Image (tube, grey):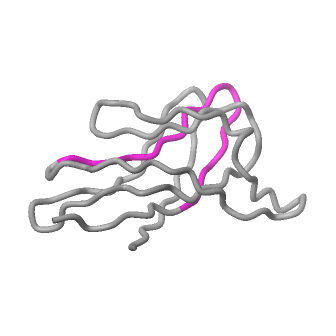
Amino acid sequence: MFYKSFAVTGFVNVTTFDDGLISSIEEPKKIRAILISVSKYRGNILEGWIETNRILEIYDFVLNTYDYSAQPSSFIRIPIDEVIKPGMIFKIAINCGSIQSNIHGAYEYELTT
């Protein structure tokens, strides 16, 4: 199992993506899960994309928060289990409404043959 960290700073009324997890011919990948937490609960939406196909859409209220004014929480694990075809990218995004929030976490993935 491998892990790649990500951090996305959200902006008001914008969907902001991270750089993503790239699958290549030399290193084809399968995304097993994401480990994630959100800065604050704002009613924003976490999205997961393989290229132009959205495969994940969850409100931030479902996630743990790392709001340090309260008790810090741990990451939650969201299973994905999708093969990423070579040349394609799996990306996480935060779709913010009128109040921004940020996400931090890691991709849990494996190399396939």
Quadrant in which the C terminus is drawn: bottom left
Boundaries of the magenta span: 88-105
Q: Work out which residue is located at the far left of the displayed protein and give it.
A: 25
Q: Position of residue 68 (x, y in %)?
A: 83, 62
Q: Residue at x 66, y 43 (%)?
A: 101
Q: Is residue 41 above or below residue 29?
A: above
Q: Residue at x 66, y 38 (%)?
A: 100
Q: Quadrant of residue 53?
A: top left
Q: Is residue 96 magenta?
A: yes
Residue 78 or residue 20, whichever sits in front: 78
- The tally of labels here is 0
Prevailing SS of the magenta stretch? strand
Q: Work out which residue is located at the far bottom of the displayed protein and give it.
A: 1
Q: Residue at x 19, y 61 (%)?
A: 28
Q: Quadrant of residue 13?
A: top right
Q: Position of residue 77 (x, y in %)?
A: 59, 57
Residue 90 or residue 9, whichever sits in front: 90
Taking the image as shown, residue 38 lies to the left or right of residue 81, namely: right
Quadrant in which the N terminus is drawn: bottom left
Q: Residue at x 48, y 60 (%)?
A: 6
Residue 42 or residue 85, whichever sits in front: 85
Taking the image as shown, residue 29 lies to the left or right of residue 104, namely: left
Q: Is residue 79 above or below residue 27?
A: above
Q: Quadrant of residue 23?
A: bottom left
Q: Position of residue 55 (x, y in %)?
A: 41, 34
Q: Position of residue 52 (x, y in %)?
A: 29, 31
Q: Is residue 25 above or below residue 64?
A: below
